[in-house]
Amino acid sequence: MIISGSASQTLAAELAAELDEPLASVEYERFPDGELLAAAPGFAAEEADAERAIVVASTVSSDAHVELLQLQDAAREWGASEVVTVLPYMGYARQDEAFEEGHPISARAVARAISSGTDRVLTVNPHEEAVCDFFDVPAEPIDAAGRLADPLPADLTDPVFLSPDEGALDIAATVRDAYGAGDTDYFEKKRLSGTEVELTPSDTDVSGRDVVVTDDIIATGSTMAEAVGILHERDARRVFLACVHPMLASNARSKLARAGVETIYGTDTIERDVSAVSVARSVADAL
């Protein structure tokens, strides 16, 4: 049985189809005092003797975290002997260390809370795979970056796959390998503050070539917009963006459009209108 958080309904439906498992009827409510209730009242009627419940919930907000904990508990309440939690996008994963004395390791805090209601965790392309070590139950990352090659134009001109820093080069290489052609490279990135970074162009000649800038997440879009601007200054033919998690917070979309992005491609780990491809197949394979 597949049980969906409110932020992951499309992906949950895709996963149910991939696995040929029923999709639970889930209700999401908010009480007058602001408290949430995410419940699966149809679970018992549809699959009362389900041995395994798979809760699919991207924790894109604090409310989504509460929903996830409630749905895990609902699965136990209806007698599931195994609860598997799929985090297409794990919120707070980038807070994987204390920024200064007295600060929490927020990724660890939420991982412990999630662990209390599940037997196993799968999370798609976390910012750092080491975040899986924070869970108190078996947890493993799923690499779905290769899926980003699917929506790219088939006629890219002498493509270059770039990452915004060396740490994300493996994503660029994965997308390039799945596409089947092209070079890879990365920008040198120096973080100046929590919101400001400085990019140094790579030595790869991009003049007249199509460039695909890849990353695990596009959040505010500032780094990507700077990268796109540099590439256009160096006469790139077209610039595409491809990311696993298209957060696109605040004015990210406008920022990227002004920078001259051709198209943004993302997956459905965070469901946006740029979610051009599903990670359901990758998740199904891991299950």
Image (cartoon, helix red, strand yellow):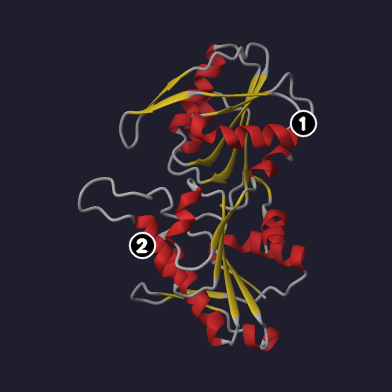
Location of residue 239 by image quarter: top right
* Figure check: 63 above or below 201: below
Name the image quarter holding the N terminus: bottom right
Between the C-alphas of marks 2 and 1, the distance is 40 Å
Residue at coordinates 47% horizontally, 51% vertically from top-left? Answer: 130
Observer-nearest residue: 7 or 195?
A: 195
User: Label 1: how many residues lie within 10 Å, few (<14), some (14-19) or many (20+)?
Assistant: few
Query: Residue 40 location, x and y as percent?
Result: 57, 80
Return the disc, 2 or 1, that comes first in the chain's sequence: 2
Residue 272 % position (x, y): 58, 49
From the top left corner, tell me how far across and down residue 190 is, in percent: 38, 26
Q: Quadrant of residue 197?
A: top left
Residue 109, numbered circle: 2
The quarter in which the C terminus is drawn is bottom right
Amino acid under label 2?
Ala
Find numbered disc 2 in the image and state the secondary structure of the residue it sits on.
helix
